[in-house]
Amino acid sequence: MEWFDPVQRDLKRVIHLLHRPDVDQQVQKIYQLLYRTAVRIGRKTRSSTGEPLNLKRKEDDFLPVRFQLYKAHCLKAVTEALDQWKRGPKTKEDHNQIFLCMQVALACF
């Protein structure tokens, strides 16, 4: 039996949404999923040391045209984060690498 893993679920959902033909209409939803996942991972890496998360939430100003330019970068960052998450991050450095991938994906917006 596989344990419920919200990070893996959200990352797979983002990859699915990035492959949809109507990705332009899904930009805000993709961002919300990525932000939620980044916060989850960031809590694991930053909370133990007292470091701030340094994530600023974007409320609007989602430009589908700009996102189309960076969609491939976002997909690559999310895929890398999912692969690293599936391997099972064991150290703080592993979590930091995943968090960095999430920051790269969020920067595409």
Image (cartoon, helix red, strand yellow):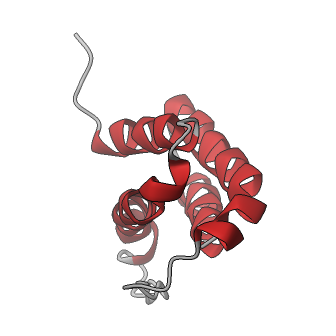
In the displayed structure, 37 sits above or below 46; it is above
**Camera-side residue: 56 or 71?**
71
The quarter of the image holding the C terminus is bottom right
In the displayed structure, 30 sits above or below 78; it is below
Residue drawn at x 44%, y 83% is 53
**What percent of the width, then of the height, locates residue 44?**
38, 63
**What percent of the width, then of the height, locates residue 55?**
47, 84
**What percent of the width, then of the height, locates residue 3?**
23, 25
In the displayed structure, 42 sits above or below 15; it is below
Residue drawn at x 51%, y 77% is 62
The quarter of the image holding the N terminus is top left
Describe residue 76's horizontal placement relative to residue 3 as left or right.
right
Describe residue 2's horizontal placement relative to residue 21 as left or right.
left
Q: Quadrant of residue 35?
A: bottom left
Residue drawn at x 69%, y 72% is 66
Q: Quadrant of residue 48?
A: bottom left
**Camera-side residue: 12 or 91?**
12
User: Does residue 91 appear anywhere in the picture?
Assistant: no
User: Does residue 11 appear anywhere in the picture?
Assistant: yes
**What percent of the width, then of the height, locates residue 37?**
39, 58
Describe residue 32's horizontal placement relative to residue 61 as left or right.
left
